[in-house]
Image: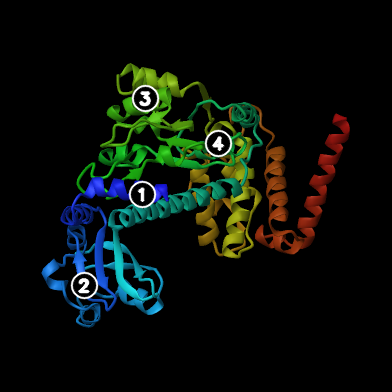
Amino acid sequence: MSEQIHLNRTSHKFFGSLQEAYDRLDAIIENSYDGIYITDGQAVTMRINRAYETITGMKAEEVLGRSMWELEKSGVIDRSGTLIALAQHRAVTLEQEFKTGRRALISSAPVFDDMGNVVMVVTNVRDMTDLYHLQQKYQEKKELSEKLYSEVEFARNQVLNSSELLAVDAKMLEMLELVRRVAARDTTVLLLGETGVGKEMVAKHIYKNSPRRNERFLTINCGAIPPNLMESELFGYEKGAFTGASRNGKPGLFEVADKGTVFLDEIGELPKDMQVKLLRVLQERTVTRIGGNRAIPVDVRVLAATNRDLEQMVRDKAFREDLYYRLSVVPITIPPLRERRDDIVPFAQCFLEELCHKYGLHKSFDQTARQALLHYEWPGNVRELRNVVERVVITVRRDEITAGDLPFQSRWSPVPDFPDPDGPVSLKALTEQFEMRYIQRAYEKYGNVRQAAASLGMDASTFVRKRKKYADAAERCNSETE
């Protein structure tokens, strides 16, 4: 009872006269951030405030004294929370969009008298437009992030599921041993070598055997991105950073690859102004988007590759010396294919089997083709070898591919080397050597006496006799050697 008396005294002190109380209550309604709409128990409009006019675009003179039934029927109001609250005798909440383009949350609550009759309905209109915009932007960024993640995951799985490096030659095996040791250490690696030697495959091998193999792997070709787009692609941009920029901004590739591995291919093609920015990323482990001033931390492992002489470029002032030393913590040179000839035929056979499976064919290299492949210089390295194999797989109609089918001239020839004619020559021995090689190759090619003999213009019995003669001679030679 004392609390009620105190409340009454406080209210009387605050409001004073009845008119003053009305004026202050009116001021509270008018200064409310939310729109307020009040009707009587018959849904006739009694009061609205300025916030309601701003949100809905409707003026007080349009609705005061008018029934909500009439307003809804005439289309002034799309859906009335007041009418629903009156019909259901309970508070209701719904979403509504007005002609101003603003979206609001409508809460209508009935007010009852002592007899349980509805004497008025008070509707609160909360402007949610900005919140909806933020929610939309969040959803768009989430979808973009999911799209980027999906693309990166696809690329990562492609890398993880690709075939391992093929190496038989001693030089390549020695290089791969260094690669395996480096892969386990989270350090920057610079891969050097001619075009087509397989620098990207080595980079993928490092990634697959690194502690970051479960994170993202992004390949960035520094020579393929236009200079005017380089910075935005690598480091991203903020909303409105330049004409044509996405309204939501865009993360750069370094942000997308956070916690993963970035492979900078053709690093020697990076413009000088971008070299400075890349150096800052490597040193500070942060990126700043175009149009932004916030340093975004990134945790990436950087692998770089080039076919250019970076040391000479440093001397020519075409490549920053500090960036060169930052990238070449562990430089690895991949030898060209002509310097690891033991890899040529295994690579060719691997490509042949892969392409035959792809095209549903059954082809093979004969001895002459394998020798020609082995003795060719391969200026385009492994990439050229693959292209050559694919060309002959598609164009050669026979199942067996010979040296004559290959689209180049090899140093190797099936004709034995002739001795110096000015020196002593055994014409008989030279003739037998020539005949022995062709008989052996013909048999290897056709696999049976009849076709092999026919290819050399001999009858089968002569072919068998000569082949046995040379086989017996070779066996005697081996016995004497032992």
The span from disc 3 to disc 2 (Cα, nearest Å) is 65 Å
Q: Which of marks 1 and 3 is nearer the N terminus?
A: 1
At x 85% / y 40%, what residue is drawn? 475
Does the CB distance between marks 4 and 2 fall below 8 Å? no
Q: Nearer the viewer, mark 4 or mark 3?
A: 3
Residue count near mark 1 (Cα–Cα under 10 Å), binned few <14, some 14–19, many ≥20: few
Does the CB distance between marks 4 and 3 fall below 8 Å? no
Left or right of residue 289: residue 436: right
Q: Earlier in the sequence, mark 3 or mark 2?
A: 2
Q: What residue type is labelled 1?
A: Ile
Q: Position of residue 287 (x, y in %)?
A: 37, 32
**Disc ID at residue 245:** none
Which of 295 and 327 lies nearest the eye of the viewer? 295
At x 42% / y 37%, what residue is drawn? 254
Which of 54 and 10 lies nearest the eye of the viewer? 10
At x 27% / y 50%, what residue is drawn? 247
Q: Which amino acid does label 3 sit on?
A: Arg
Q: What residue type is labelled 2?
A: Thr
Q: Which of marks 1 and 4 is in front?
A: 1
Q: Which of marks 2 and 1 is in front?
A: 1
The span from disc 1 to disc 3 (Cα, nearest Å) is 72 Å
Residue for badge 1: 5
Q: Element type at marker 4?
A: helix
Does the CB distance between marks 3 and 2 fall below 8 Å? no
Residue for badge 2: 45
The span from disc 4 to disc 2 (Cα, nearest Å) is 77 Å
Residue for badge 4: 202
Q: Position of residue 382 (x, y in %)?
A: 52, 42
Q: Where is residue 339 in the image (x, y as percent from the top left)?
A: 56, 31
